[in-house]
Amino acid sequence: MSAPSRLAVPLLAALLFGVSPARAERVVVSLSENEIAIGSNYTGTRLALFGVVERDDRKPAPAATTDVVVTVRGPRESMTVRQKERVGPLWINRSQQKFVAVPTVLGVATSRPLSEIATPAVRRRLRLGLAEIVHAPEMTFEQTAEQDPFREALIRLKTKEGLWRQDMRGVVFVADGFFRAAVPIPATAPTGNYEVEVVILSGEKLVARRVASFEVVKKGFEERISYLSQDRSFLYAFLIGILSLGFGWVASVIFRRD
């Protein structure tokens, strides 16, 4: 069979049986701000995220068959979770587990509950949800069981601190193909680069993914103090010593007894 004939066979089958190539989708996202300035009066804020999902024919993807998962990850750090046990009248650390590259801030917002969006296997593969991210193998070098108490404790601790959160209705479709979400940045958020990952699914299948970013920085007096402590450590220590002596002298004058 010649090459043109071989190409004509699948094309003819597609025409006869109504088979068409799978539609691709693309997502465009935009953040209301690319930089968040932290000052002495900073108490937390929310970024607005807007997204547009289009098919390859430039038509908006229907909201009824489109799911969105937005994941915000802050700067990474290493953490050690310890388990205390009571020995007589004392509580001591008996076991521990070290985690690597833990997001200091972690937020997940979805268009509907994750259990309705995808199966547990799909959520684990795509890292969708707090539990799925924390239970990923790369979070720790140690081999652990599926129900790891240290990983569960990590989620509880970070959630209690207000640095991790999950909102199953945090993404809202304004119209077909157009959605918005609020990205909360807590008051205790550290400075650094933040990553915003937007995952689009349809029928449990990944159809598009986009990553945006923003930065949290210190401004004003806090920025100068941070600069001195990191780049001028000797001058910073000298000034702190002078200030301590000055405050001590003022306190001694105020509370001096006759």
Image (spheres, helix red, strand yellow):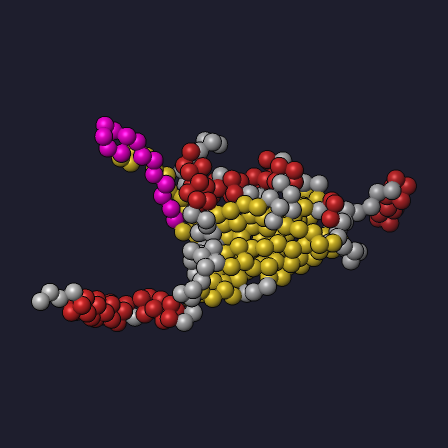
**Whole-percent x, y for residue 137 in the image:** 48, 40
Identify the main secondary structure in magenta.
strand
The boundaries of the magenta stretch are 78-91
* Looking at the image, residue 41 lies above or below residue 16: below
Q: Nearer the viewer, residue 244 or 17?
A: 244
Residue drawn at x 87%, y 49% as measured from the top left: 4
Residue 159 in view in this figure = yes
| Residue at image point 27% right, 34% down | 91
Q: Is residue 131 magenta?
A: no
The residue at the far right in this view is: 16
Q: Nearer the viewer, residue 87 or 120?
A: 87
Magenta highlight on residue 82: yes
**Residue 114's quadrant in the figure?**
top right
> Looking at the figure, which quarter contains the N terminus?
top right
* Picture quarter with the C terminus: bottom left
Considering only vertical position in the picture, is 233 above or below 123? below
Q: Residue furthest left?
A: 258
Left or right of 240 on screen, residue 26: right
Q: Residue furthest front?
A: 258
Left or right of 61 on screen, residue 28: left
Q: Residue at x 23, y 69 (%)?
A: 243
Left or right: where 74 falls relative to 204: left
- Residue 147 position, x and y percent, is 47, 31
Q: In percent of the image, x 43 and y 61: which residue is there?
A: 191
